[in-house]
Amino acid sequence: MRKHIVAGNWKMNNDLNATKSLITDLKNEKNEGDAEVIIAPTYINLDYASQTLTNTDITVAAQNMHQAESGAYTGEISAEMLKSVGVSTVIIGHSERRAYFNESDDLLASKVNAGLKNDMRVIFCFGEELEDRKSGKHEAVVASQLKNALFHIEKVAWSHIVLAYEPVWAIGTGETASPEQAQDMHAFIRKTVAAQYSQDVANNVTILYGGSVKPANAQEIFSKPDVDGGLIGGASLKAKDFFEIVNAF
Ligand code: PGA
């Protein structure tokens, strides 16, 4: 059976003090369900987070990484560096990376390769823009994002992949896809993976929904059969809210 996951993407929030206090709060919350809990603090606090959360059931992930092993890439962070501080899960392809840092499908494909080569788990994000949905192209856009940045990987690599469908129009906007819209797209994604790989691969891959998930709507979204969890931005910055979502399964 595929895994449930609730991952908190802290984005560019929380300095070291705020990170310490949020992690303390998170450790006081109780995971009452079966979802794996992941948090993705900013790079400079990953070492602290990963050390502090050793021997807990909260996993630490990075929000991004560079595709090269090492070298003259000022300001960048490699897979090896992440692994050296105990981080072996990485978010790749978040829509903010695509939109503000011009990350293309080709670049994302190489980041996926770097993650897999270094034995990391990749949370691969994708999703359509509002225009695409309005014009009925949302499924075609999602299929091409998968095809161009992910469908080159080998079948065996799928055990290292988590998918995160995040319609751009729902991220940080307060507007959530309806549970039906999320379910329809997740079913489409699973069908697309099955057609490219196998039904078995499709059945086993965890597909997260992201975009304005909150305590008030998590349960309904998570109740859909193809929604295996969430990638949470804003609501992951408060321990109580985040764990209400974690416990919505
Ligand atoms: P949001 O962000 O929950 O604040 O909409 C989701 C995301 O960007 O992953």
Image (cartoon, grey):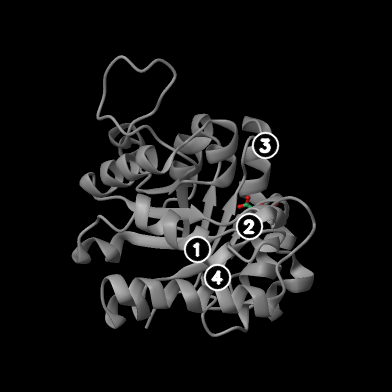
Q: Earlier in the sequence, mark 4 or mark 2?
A: 2
Q: Earlier in the sequence, mark 2 or mark 1?
A: 2
Mark 2, residues whose alpha carbon is within 10 Å: few (<14), some, or many (≥20)? some
Mark 3, residues whose alpha carbon is within 10 Å: few (<14), some, or many (≥20)? few
Q: Secondary structure at mark 1?
A: helix
The residue that disc 1 covers is 140
Q: Earlier in the sequence, mark 1 or mark 3?
A: 3
Q: Secondary structure at mark 3?
A: loop
Q: Disc 4 or disc 1, which is closer to the eye? A: 1
The residue that disc 3 covers is 13
Q: Is residue 125 above or below residue 108?
A: below
Residue visible at 58% across and 63% down?
138
The residue that disc 4 covers is 229
The answer to whether residue 195 is left or right of residue 27 is left
Mark 4, residues whose alpha carbon is within 10 Å: few (<14), some, or many (≥20)? many
Tell me where residue 156 sits by quadrant: bottom left
Observer-nearest residue: 100 or 246? 100
